[in-house]
Every structure is written in C-alpha cells, then in structure tokens.
Image: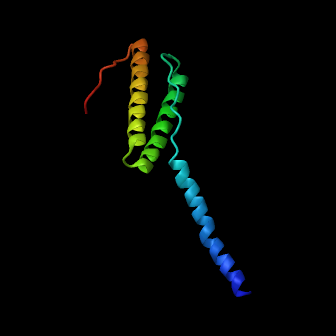
C-alpha cells in the first residue's frame, strides 16, 4: 500500500468519528419544542402520555442548558421550563381534585 493511501485511511479514521460526535453535540444544543399541556383532562392514559412528554422535554432541555452555559438563551429556557412545570402541576392538581385525591403537597 502506498504511503498516500495510508494517510487517507488514517485521516478518515480521525475525521469520520469527529463528524458524528459533532452531529450528536449539535443535536443536544438545539432547543426542544415545548410540550402541549391541556387545561384539563380526566383520562388516566392521557395523563400518562402528558407526563412522559413533560419528562422527555425536561431531559432534552437540561441537555440544551448544558450547551448554553451563561447567556440569554439559557435564562429564557429556564423560564420556559418553569412555566411547563407550573402548567403540569396545575393539571395534576385538577386531575386529583376530580378523583377526590389529596392535592396537598407533602414534605419528606
């Protein structure tokens, strides 16, 4: 094998993984779309689906925050995450009230 072929092979062994790593890092640094939270539902299956979408949103948002460090985008994302959590908590309280469950917060 010629030396130039070896150089190309060696270069591709370095460059290709860097491209994939860069793509993964870029995906984590994209802002995720805010989940839709209805004003009310009493359907347990829908509540579970909403819970999963909120959890996925929060996980993706935390990865986004890791990329942003300290800037206005980070602060805006934190504000949005707090709104999603507040909307979800209101929905949970309404759901529990409808079912006659306790809506009091407990401290452990």
Residue 17 vertical position relative to residue 92 in the rendered view, above or below: below
Residue situated furthest front in the rendering = 72
> Where is residue 24 shown, x and y percent of the image?
56, 54
Q: Is residue 107 left or right of residue 48?
A: left
Total marks shown come to 0
Task: Residue at 40%, 29% (x, y): give it.
Answer: 85
Q: In the image, what residue occupies the spot 57% across and 64% down?
A: 18
* Color style of the picture: rainbow
Q: Quadrant of the N terminus?
A: bottom right
Q: Nearer the viewer, residue 49 or 81?
A: 81
* Residue 73 in picture, x, y percent from top left: 43, 41
Instruction: Please state if 23 lies on the left or on the right of 100 as rendered.
Output: right
**Residue at the extreme left of the image, as rendered:** 107
Residue found at the far bottom of this picture: 2
Give the residue displayed 43% in from the left and 29% down from the top: 84
Which of the image's four quarters has the C terminus? Answer: top left
Name the residue rendered at 68%, 82% in the picture.
Answer: 6
Q: Is residue 81 above or below residue 22?
A: above
Q: Quadrant of residue 96?
A: top left
What percent of the width, then of the height, locates residue 49? 54, 29
């Amino acid at each position: 094998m010629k030396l130039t072929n070896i150089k190309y092979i060696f270069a591709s062994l370095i460059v290709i993984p860097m491209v994939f790593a860069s793509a993964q890092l870029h995906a984590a640094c994209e802002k995720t779309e805010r989940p839709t939270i209805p004003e009310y539902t009493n359907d347990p299956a829908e509540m579970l689906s909403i819970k999963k979408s909120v959890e996925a949103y929060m996980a993706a948002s935390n990865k986004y925050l890791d990329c942003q460090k300290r800037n206005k985008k980070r602060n805006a994302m934190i504000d949005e995450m707090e709104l999603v959590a507040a909307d979800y908590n209101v929905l949970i309280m309404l759901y529990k009230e409808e079912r006659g469950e306790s809506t009091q917060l407990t401290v452990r």
